[in-house]
Image: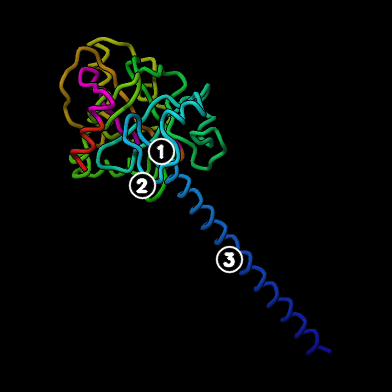
Amino acid sequence: MAAAALRLVNFIVDGAVVIIFGLLFICGLYRFVDSEFAYRQADNAVSYDRPGMRPKRGRKLSFDQLRRMNHDVFGWLEVDGTNISYPLVQGSDNVKYVNTDVKGGFSLIGSIFLDCRNSRDFSDASSIIYGHHMNRHRMFGSLECFEGRKYFERHRTGWLFYDKRWHRVHFFAFVKADAHDAVLFNPYLEKGRKAESGYLKYVRRHACRYRKIRGGREGHFVTLATCSEKSTNGRYLLIGRIEREGSISSGRRMEMVDEQD
């Protein structure tokens, strides 16, 4: 009788172990598939033709087609030498595009989006662009690389497309910030030399990496922001100045890309 009871207990224990390991395997498989699906979505987000660029084989939609499909699409962002090359969107709030793709459908990785309080012509003193922090340098996953001195020195420029033209961006600071920072996340910064000087001093005081930038007629800064995996409210910020005087047409930008290729 005791032997039968012991066999029953062993059978139950063995069965429970098998079930637990089976559930763990299923959970692991789900996380893997879920992650791969998210990475595929991130890859699809860069499968569109940039504004004014010659169509490439395998591209799904042109920039103009995206705009017709979703009126929230208004521009493009690139950071030279990185995987960051995405359409820009702006919603009526800062929640929609956390889990919405550029075509307006549900997406785990969301989109690269401009703060809803900013103007689409980047005329504000400070414009803020958000994106998810993903592994494999997808979306804004490569921002953390700017903490490294060599990486920061080698990746100085980027491009913003808006108002039918490309505008060069000169990046000058990498900051580890708190999500509630009232200065770095303030799109209502005052304009003018005095306000600009105060802003730059604040950025330099909080920056992990910083380089001096030349003065301009009027400061128009742009901040790329993503989450930090090390802190709940931690954020990685890459800050640059928009060079309005150096804006170029899509045709000239296309020539520059061809020259680089």
Where residue 257 appears, x then y in whole percent?
Answer: 23, 36
Number of other residues with Cα within 10 Å of mark 2, as a class: few under 14, some 14 to 19, many 20 or more: some
Mark sitting on residue 48: 1
Task: State the CA–CA distance, disc 1 to disc 2.
Answer: 18 Å
The amino acid pointed to by label 3 is Phe
Mark sitting on residue 90: none
- N-term-proximal mark, 3 vs 1: 3
Where residue 53 appears, x then y in whole percent?
Answer: 31, 33
Q: Is residue 151 visible?
A: yes
| Corner quadrant of residue 83 | top left
Q: Is residue 109 above or below residue 157?
A: below
User: Looking at the image, which is closer to me, 36 or 57?
Assistant: 57
Q: Which of the two marks, 1 or 2, is nearer to us in this view?
A: 1
For the residues bearing labels 1 and 2, Cβ distance under 8 angstroms: no
Residues shaded magenta = 233-253
Where residue 28 appears, x then y in whole percent?
Answer: 55, 61
Q: What kind of element bears circle 1?
A: loop
Q: Which residue is mark 3?
A: 25
Q: Which of the two marks, 3 or 1, is nearer to us in this view?
A: 1
Q: What kind of element bears circle 2?
A: helix
Count how many numbered circles sit on residues in the image. Answer: 3
**Colour theme:** rainbow
Where residue 161 appears, x then y in whole percent?
Answer: 33, 26
The amino acid pointed to by label 2 is His
| Corner quadrant of residue 96 | top right
Tell me the residue at 37%/51% (across/down).
Answer: 136
Q: Is residue 229 visible?
A: no
Q: Is residue 200 above or below residue 171?
A: above
Q: Quadrant of the C terminus?
A: top left
Q: Which of the two marks, 2 or 3, is nearer to us in this view?
A: 2
Mark sitting on residue 137: 2
